[in-house]
Amino acid sequence: MARGLSERVFAVCTGVVAVHAVDDATLHGTGGLTGSRPAALVAVLAALALVAGYLRAGRTARTALALAVGLFATAHGIGVHVAHAAKVELSGADFTGLLELAAGIVLLLLALALQLAGRRLRARALVVLGAVLVLEWLVIPVTVGTYATSVPHAPVPAAASIGIPGAADVAFPAGDGTQLAGWWVPGTNGAAVIVMHGSSSTREATLAHVRMLARNGYGVLAFDARGHGESAGQANAFGWRGADDVVGAVAFLRRRAGVDPGRIAALGLSMGAEEALRAAALGIGLAAVVADGAGASTTGDQRLAAGGLETAIAIPQTWMTMRVTALLSGESEPEPLGTAVRRIDVPVLLIASSAGDERALDGIFRERIGPEATLWYVADAGHTRALAVHPDEYARRVTGFLSSALL
């Protein structure tokens, strides 16, 4: 690549990233950056220093600089701003955030072009192979880790608007004191079910499940996981701290009039299913669990699901993703769910679709839980879509299971 062109591309793209940082820190703070005027000044000075360093650097150092800035801009653009635009709306700093993403992609391509320039065919092939590995084992994990810990706070409708008699907005502390927001629907049969949504979602996504349970007389507590919806705390789309949320939910229900403390169950979707299973393994006051769409939320669980060539690609990628998530969230990757479920001693209904490795992994969970577990495989439904595809059978199976376990 021509030296002058390389310098101009790096300077312009780094400038775009700095402009977004200033926007995010001063005008439209979305929470993605630190959100202050000093932060904006630091971003401008950092951009000037990066450009000055690039001008004096050799090819290897230039590649490293383009890769580093490009990786940050791409991960931040997708993980924060594309996520916010998709889950909430395109607004505020999302506009410059999308420009940041474009600049990040250009910088990643610049890093590749710098390494390809002047090399022979065989060397270029090795560079391309290296680029693929960098994409798989660095760019994707950093982007996913950023997304997992930067869940946008989507608005949630008030309980009065969901059309369920008696529904009320409630708030309660998790086991570690984090404030959680939810809906509470009183029941008539003395039993209660905690309903837990999937990653990067809110309790609104569980509304059909809440209605199904309420129609059958159960008290229902549906809440936003920490860092999601209207709940406080650090987001983690892998649900590593979900057991603390369940501790708070169980304590809330034990204080409700008309709820038998020994008849509390959980129904979780995707991330919520994994959180419910982990809570049951820890013995956190659940008499039964319905786990709809549980998957791999740790490196160990990914190892259970992967096989063949997939292992060589997926395991390093998952490992790196978990390291990034741990770094950004300040949390440690928990024990693999595949190990933890061996300690579950309450009835469990696992619901699996044909999505990904869900069926295989849930089959392993069923075997390791033992005779208390039942697996319903729904081949023609997507991930956590069994209620939408088979509403009558889903209601019959789930309420029948809960009736047997709780009533």
Image: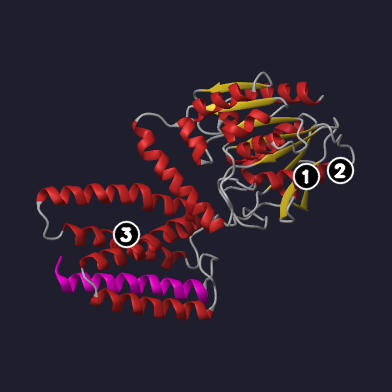
Specify the farthest residue to the top: 371
Q: How many discs mark residues in the rendered view? A: 3
Question: Looking at the image, which residue is at 71% across and 22% down?
Answer: 401
Q: Which residue is mark 1?
A: 184
Q: Nearer the viewer, residue 216 or 171?
A: 171
Residue 155 x %, y %: 62, 55
Closer to us: mark 3 or mark 1? 3
Mark 2 touching mark 1, by CB under 8 A?
Answer: yes
Residue 391 seen by the camera:
no
| Badge 3 amino acid | Ile
Residue beneath disc 2: 256
* Spatial CA span between label 3 and label 2: 52 Å
Instruction: Name the kind of residue labelled 1 in the image.
Output: Trp
Task: Choose the circle earlier in sequence order: 3 or 1.
Answer: 3
Q: Is residue 143 left or right of residue 209?
A: left
Residue pictured at 37% horizontal, 76% vertical: 47
Residue 105, numbered circle = 3
Counting residues from the start of the chain, the first of labels 2 and 1 encountered is 1
Residue 282 marker: none
Q: Residue at x 37, y 48 (%)?
A: 137
Q: Quadrant of residue 48?
A: bottom left
- Residue 13 placed where, x, y %? 31, 69
Measure the alpha-carbon separation of dots 3 and 1: 45 Å
- Part of the protein shown in magenta: 1-27
Q: Quadrant of the C terminus?
A: top right
Q: Amino acid at mark 2?
A: Arg
